[in-house]
Image (spheres, grey):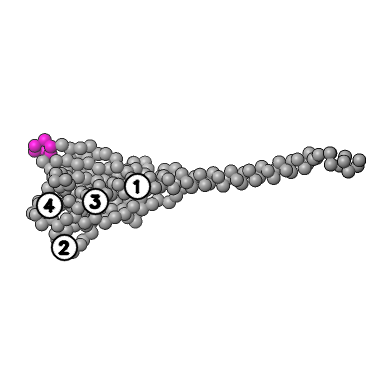
Amino acid sequence: MTDRREKDRGYTLVEALVVMMIFGIVIAIVMGIVIQVSYGAADNMTRVSQVRNAELALAQIDRQVRSGNVISDPNEESETASGVPAGDSLRVFTQTDGVHQCVQWRVKYADDDERGVLEYRSWDPQWETVGGNVDDWSVVARDIVANDEHQAFHKIDTGQSETSSVQITVFVQGERTQSKPTAVSTTLTGRNTIYGYPVDSCDNVPAP
């Protein structure tokens, strides 16, 4: 009878509180791990999407540079012509798909933020004299972050007067992500420009 009463008496209040406290600690640890894994997965998905968008933009620049007749020197680009400091814009006189046009790319940062966008526009080389089209700026990649060690656009001296190469490096990072900025970089070489195109073909730049 004594053994039966000992088995039926249940838990004391102190024992119940200790069990509840241990259970709460375990739940807190598990939830912390789940939250960290969720944040990591979300960061990775955001980073992959940003890198993909930047790579698509660089692929478009690649087509235009490879068909480029005249490639400007980004270090000599003026803020008056591009709306951004030298090194943050690229201007190309290209004939992609057989159409002669001037194209311009730039990385533009907000006035109160180090986060910017990669933008693109094009215009008819004769836009001012024959009324050709001038397209507005369009955003092709977002969440571009500044990096003092790298210019977005940098012309490379190949040692050959017939060709031009340009290095493009942009860093992307989500606004609410914890991951470090990811560099997306490529070096593009234009085709042999031996056809005597004037180097000032796209110097008549519309207001940015």
**Mark closest to the chain's N terminus, 3 or 1:** 1
Asked whether disc 1 touches disc 4, contact meaning CB atoms under 8 Å apart, the reply is no
Segment colored magenta: 127-132
Q: Which residue is mark 1?
A: 52
Tag in front: 3 or 2: 3
Provide the residue designation for mark 2.
Answer: 160
Type of the residue with mark 4: Val
Cα separation, mark 1 vs mark 4, equals 33 Å
Point out residue 106 in the picture as x, y percentages from the top left corner.
Answer: 26, 46
Residue 40 in view = yes
Instruction: Report the Cα–Cα distance between label 2 and label 1.
Output: 33 Å
> Which residue was labeled with disc 4?
199
Q: Secondary structure at mark 1?
A: helix
Question: Which kind of residue does numbered mark 3 sit on?
Answer: Asp
Residue 187: x and y, percent? 26, 56
| Cα distance between the residues tagged 4 and 3 | 20 Å
Q: Amino acid at mark 2?
A: Gln
Mark 2 and mark 4 lie on one chain; the one further toward the N terminus is: 2
CA neighbours of label 3 inside 10 A, class few (<14), some (14 to 19), many (20+): some
